[in-house]
Image (cartoon, rainbow, N blue to C red):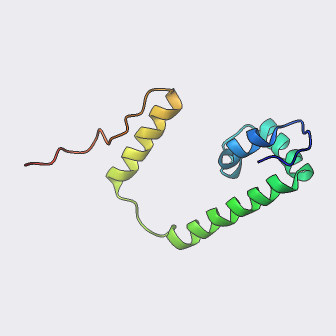
């Protein structure tokens, strides 16, 4: 998506990193660039608002369920692999094989 107008921070970059912005997982200098972009670009601001609303809805509707400890460990382990740049297998390497 692009509004067709030139911006200091490209629309594609903003949308590619939107969840990092929503989750406050980016440096303040980048957050400031994104805030500036949202002030200039209504399509990106609209997308931001939509994603923020969905995130709040999910939190409200699903935020009270307890996550199984093993699932949490698997997800965090996979995130660590992704962040370290290691290859992430398509299948669950932590699953126990099914007995035949």
> Where does the image place residue 97, in percent across and percent down from the top left?
17, 44
In the image, residue 100 above or below residue 87 = below
Outermost residue, left direction?
A: 100
Q: Which residue is drawn at 90% across and 52% down?
A: 39
Q: Where is residue 99 in the image (x, y as percent from the top left)?
A: 9, 48
Location of residue 34 (image quadrant): top right
Taking the spot 42% from the left edge, 33% from the top edge, the residue there is 88
The image quarter in which residue 5 lies: top right
Picture coordinates of residue 85 (x, y %)?
51, 26
Q: Is residue 12 left or right of residue 97?
A: right
- Left or right of residue 33, residue 52 in this image: left
Q: Is residue 97 above or below residue 85?
A: below
Q: How many labels does the image show?
A: 0
Q: Point out the residue furthest to the front here.
A: 4
Left or right of 5? Residue 76 is: left
- Tell me where residue 11 sits by quadrant: top right
Q: In terms of depth relative to the viewer, which is nearer, 64 or 55?
A: 55
Please, is residue 51 above or below residue 77 in the view? Answer: below
At 89% from the left and 35% from the top, the residue drawn is 8
Q: Which of 13 and 1 is in front in this view?
A: 1
């Amino acid at each position: 998506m692009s509004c067709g107008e030139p911006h200091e921070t490209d629309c594609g970059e903003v949308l590619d990193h939107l969840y990092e912005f929503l989750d406050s997982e980016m440096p303040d200098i980048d957050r400031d660039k994104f805030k500036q972009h949202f002030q200039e670009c209504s399509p990106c601001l609209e997308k931001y608002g939509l994603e923020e609303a969905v995130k709040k809805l999910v939190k409200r509707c699903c935020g009270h369920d307890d996550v199984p400890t093993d699932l949490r460990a698997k997800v965090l382990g996979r995130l660590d692999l992704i962040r370290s740049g290691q290859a992430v297998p398509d299948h669950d390497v932590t699953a126990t094989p099914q007995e035949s």
